[in-house]
Amino acid sequence: MKKPYQIEAQRAVKQLEAMAADGNPAVQMVLPMAEMVGWLRKGVGALIRQAGLQLMDLMMQEEVRELAGKRSEPQAERTANRWGSERGYCVVMGQKVPIQRPRVRTTDDKEVRLGSYEIFHRGEPLTETVWEKLMLGLSTRKYGQAVRQFAEAYGLEKSAISEHFIEASRTKLKEMTERRLDKMRLCALLIDATPFAGQQMVAALGVGQDGRKTILGIRQGATENSTVVGELLGDLMNRGLDFVQLRLYVLDGGKALHTAVRKYAGESAPIQRCQVHKRRNVLDHLTHEQKPWVAKKLNAAYALEDYAAAQQSLNALHRELMDLNPSAARSLAEGLEETLTVHRLHVPPQLRKTLASTNVIESAFSIVERVCRNVKRWHAGDQRERWVGSGLLVAEKQFRRVQGHKQIPILLRELEALVPSKSEVVKRRKAS
């Protein structure tokens, strides 16, 4: 709900637009040549900035003339009077620049807002400008030094910039976590968790049937547990994501993720365990001498196109590891079948390379780490969510279609083949 002063500001802007459209008054600006040359010595930018400030003053004075009439001329039907001026500011290139704002009052002593000043005052969205520049790596301490274009500009202190960023990042996070998902048709949903500043950040990313990637949501927790993941999936469902629709679920291998997906998508939902995480988990049990040849065999097995051949190769490696390191063998055996879901679905090699792991999310998190490198101290509250959400939105802007997106129809046909026919359902019910 808009506040009264916001409504008055909008009304003033509309009145200015109506005045300009009706009478189309001309605003003439005369600049002394000597003064212009002085500005030019500081560069063309200085000339443009100073001339712009004078033009803004002329526009406000013209609006005052339309409201209160010409100065020192009696008017019987005058409804407003000039009332001096006061200090104000306009927003230019992410900074507040002081200007003198002329005041006008009605004959019954009510303040009249100037539409021109409201436009200048609002200017560029300051919080948006701060957010964009901090996402590019500019720190709050150096913000003023980097963006200052006017010697008299203010509001560039670290604390002020921090407040603007908090407001902007909170708005960005809210928009991202509340956008509706009803119309999204996803062929795959990727979920991964990563440690971040002492907490676990769980992110969900959707791959559309057109191959486009979208950040769906994030959740923060002390650990990667089923409650945190369940809340994330529940939020996606409340925002319109249809879990009845068949899609591939690509997970990092954590049991919490597996449990939550089964709860929302059903026991028959096809799950692909991340092959990169599986490789990493197996190799963590081995010595430096053992890792190269085991990694080579794992890579070779997952590179096979035929499901049976890949399964046979992994089973053979499992037997070898039982003699070498039983812990590594058990790590390989845990969820082994789910690491081959893309093989079982006959996903073409190019698309399979994308959907066999959660690397897409991990690459997005690498952008988050770059964005957050200037943060030296983390606090409680929503700071982590705001920064991670902002970083993921930056990553989302850089997303391209997944490799092999033209092969997605093949994946969709394979997923549809997993749905049992009505006759098969009846037979199963009778048998049970």
Image: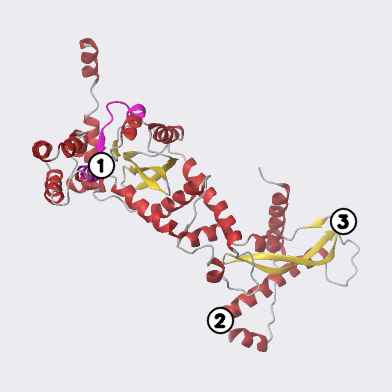
Locate residue 164 relative to residue 213 in the image: left or right: right
Mark 2–mark 3 CB contact (< 8 Å): no
Asked if residue 322 lies in the magenta stretch, the reply is: no
- Assess disc 3: are there few (<14), some (14-19) or many (≥20) residues with their C-alpha within 10 Å of its C-alpha: few
Q: Amino acid at mark 1?
A: Cys
Q: How is the image coloured?
A: secondary structure
Picture quadrant where residue 82 is located = bottom right
Q: Is residue 264 visible?
A: yes
Q: Note whether 307 is above or below 125 in the view shown.
A: above
- Describe the element under mark 3 as helix, strand or loop: loop
Residue 125 seen: no
Disc 2 or 3, which lies upstream in sequence? 2
In this figure, which residue is indicated by the disc labeled 3? 109
Magenta span? 262-282
Task: Specify whether 388 is left or right of 260.
Answer: right
**Residue sitting at x 39%, y 35%:** 229
What separation in Å lies between label 2 and label 3 (alpha carbons)? 44 Å
Quadrant showing the N terminus: top right
Direction from residue 15 to residue 106 in the image, left or right? right
Q: Position of residue 262 (x, y in %)?
A: 32, 28
Mark 2 residue crowding within 10 angstroms, few (<14) / some (14–19) / many (20+)? few
Foreground: disc 3 or disc 1: 1
Q: Amino acid at mark 2?
A: Val
Q: Which mark is residue 44?
A: 2
Report how far apart the C-alphas of labels 3 and 1 lie in the structure. 71 Å
Residue type at the position of mark 3? Asp
Q: Do the CB atoms of the residues marked 1 and 2 lie less than 8 Å apart? A: no
